[in-house]
Image (tube, grey):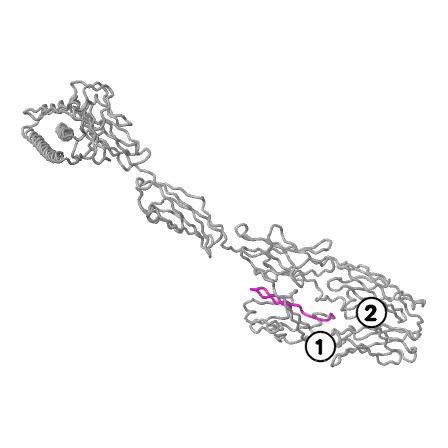
Amino acid sequence: MFCGAAYILNRTMRRQVLFFISIFYIGYVVGQVSYSIPEEMPKGSVVGNIARDLGIDVRRLKSGKSRIFTSDSAEYIELSRERGVLLLKERIDRESLCRQTTPCALHLQIILENPMELFRITVEITDINDNSPSFKNDEKRFEISESAVTGSKFVLERAVDADIGINGLKNYSLRPTDNFVLKIENQADGQKKVEMVLQKPLDREKEEQISLLLNAVDGGDPQMSGTVKIYVTVLDANDNAPVFTKSVYKATIAENSQKGTTVTTVSASDADKGTNGDVSYLVSATMDSVSDIFTVNQNGEVILVGEVDFEKAKYYQIDIEAKDSGGLSDSSKVIVDVIDINDNEPVISILSKSDSIPENSPHNTVILMFSVYDSDSSNNGQVNCRLNSNIPFTITAASNDFYSLVTDSDLDRERASEYKITLTCSDEGVPSLSSSVTLTLHISDVNDNVPVFERSSYEAYIVENNTPGLLIFTVKATDADWNQNARVSYILEDSSVNGVPVSSYVSVSADSGVIHAVRSFDYEQIKDFHFRVKAQDGGSPPLSSNVTVKIMIQDQNDNPPQVLYPVQTGGSLVAEMVPRSADVGYLVTKVVAVDVDSGQNAWLSYKLQKATDRALFEVGLQNGEIRTIRQVTDKDAVKQRLTVIVEDNGQPSRSATVIVNVAVADSFPEVLSEFTELTHDKEYNDNLTFYLVLALAVVSFLFITCLVVIISVKIYRWRQSRILYHSNLPVIPYYPPRYSDTLGTGTLPHVYNYEVCRTTDSRKSDCKFGRAGSQNVLIMDPSSTGTMQRIQSEKSILDEPDSPLEVSLMKLQMILNACHFCMHGILEVIRELAMHILFLP
């Protein structure tokens, strides 16, 4: 007989490989709760208060997005998050769920996130007596020869009870028992072999038809039963029953074998001759539908007529009956072991996953959870999973057959913003079967990169006299982060330039990094300056870097040359004298000019723009020297007026002009004599003479006044010194400090004789300078308080150092020096006035 419990898939023995994925790195808590409920409970019945039994707050079930996961698609139990209880989603029939497997249990997991927690729930389904024993056929017919010997056995159909345990099949009974008794034999697999044994010879003449009733009962409460009617037709004599060569036959067959495959061959023999010795074979009918899968022909060959699936049944028990024509029979059992073939690929079921994780996730961060199921057995059901290469993830075992796909190295969104994770699971069958699933994991950005400027430092140029608000240039920084973390803002760091805040010079656009000039720059005031710009991202906390920017002001030709010499003022004119004996190349004077610009803008060139006699003078192009280009002659005019233009090299160029007055004469009187040749109107000449005489009179008056005062003071002091001398007191003469005349280095180095020639026409008056008229030298030691030594080139007639004569001579020398100084000043004033009058336009 086929054992129905043998081929039922034992759900509790299935191989399950579970993997967990989560964005949180935790050691997930694993708890286990078991419940026991009877089958056939109505839909919506409470299985258990899972929140209370696990010690979980109901709010945690909501916030953790709790859900139930099962290894197969059937979901009999659901979770009520609001109540924290497990409810029956649909009515459960233990017999359809587990058949004869015991215990029958549902294995499910409750998963919570944030943080990840896993709880294993076992719900055992207990049996109730809701199935009665049943037979496949309602009746059974035998044809038995009246010559059948006592003890002949006849195989009866076995009853099937879907319930288990005490509710399962318990016993059989046969009525009436006049000719036959019931024999029940327990087999090694727990099944019962039911046979009807002849205990009293049959007599066809007395009773040709015998009716029996086979009753099967279970052990449940209330007790349930099933019956089958047995009809026996008594035939004429048949002495021997068929006998199988083996009581048990064993065979193997590979699953998915083709129909018509011969599994094995059974053999039974009958000692009778003729038709009574002919043996026929048949498969005993049972409710396990074995007869739909296997059949036996008259040669005893057991043939496959249905489909064999190892995952549905690992072996089959076939009850074969051998029967002769006289109605006698024997039975044997064929046990067919199904050989597993690797015909099922692993099935991957995603349990939980995250679409993204932050790039700063630590090692061993769990990112994925899924299950893999292979219904094959042995090596064919052994599953190994692997990941595609070059990704920073690995598979690690957690506990209780659960596994985690976790990070095993640092993540960097800037190197890889997402990963294509291909998980391939293969069994160990030959050939190996595999399945795979591809997931996309995004790496979310963390603000871990500072903005980086394109250069380590910047230099920019701007031309002076710019317009305020002018764009100078742009600094640019990039941030390898993403979105808000990569949004760069530019900030001008506080600093000062020459004591002035740098913000009054430039401004920086916060969004674009564009640097604008706040003011107009002047190269002559500031040539360059530097400041720092900070680039700051929008992360939290923000990261920043800075760079030094140097601004260099470029010169513009905005300043004309400035003439330093000769000085051009409205109050005086400078005139140069050139003797008539001057040779070619004689240096008259030099025009000195500067330009505050720089570079080419400050390169100066000198040109003679206008001259009284262009053939007499030239100007050095680079040095501004005015020289004669020919010999001066008597025909050359005394008054020479030169206009020199000084020009820079800028674009456009700027220039300045200077007028140089030159007097061609050997002496100053010759210059004055030129005045008579000037043609002026009478009023102008009268005014000029008047002013000149007035100037001479004022100067002479001042000179005479000073001279009288000095002489009076000296005479007064001399008289005082005589009084002190005759009184025999020590005489300490007083001398003005620093009036020494030693070796010609004093303030008045020489004593000059002046010869003044006066005429009725003041313009022809002359003054001649004589040679030094004295070789006497007076030495004053400033550090001495009263000592004076006299040194003469000839021997002194007075040897006394403090004699009155020596003092008088010294005073006379000082008076002469003062007179010389005054006369020299008077002559300079006269000369300046004469030149002014000479070169008036």
What quarter of the picture does the C terminus occupy? top left
The tag earlier along the polypeptide, 2 or 1, is 1
Question: With 701 as the anchor, is 216 left or right in this view?
Answer: right
Within-10-Å neighbours for mark 2: few <14, some 14–19, many 20+:
few
What quarter of the picture does the N terminus occupy? bottom right
Above or below, comparing residue 476 to residue 241 in the picture:
above
- Which circle marks residue 128 in the picture? 1
- In space, the residues marked 2 and 1 are separated at their CA atoms by 26 Å
The residue lying toward the viewer, choosing from 22 and 353, is 22
**Which segment did they paint magenta?**
101-120
Place of residue 623 in the rendered image (x, y in percent of width and height, measured from the top left): 28, 27
Amino acid type of disc 1? Ile
Question: With 206 as the anchor, is 734 left or right in this view?
Answer: left
Q: Is residue 112 magenta?
A: yes
- Which circle marks residue 188 in the picture? 2
Question: With 300 as the anchor, is 548 left or right in this view?
Answer: left
Place of residue 268 in the rendered image (x, y in percent of width and height, measured from the top left): 89, 65
Magenta stretch: dominant SS? strand
The residue lying toward the viewer, choosing from 131 and 732, is 732
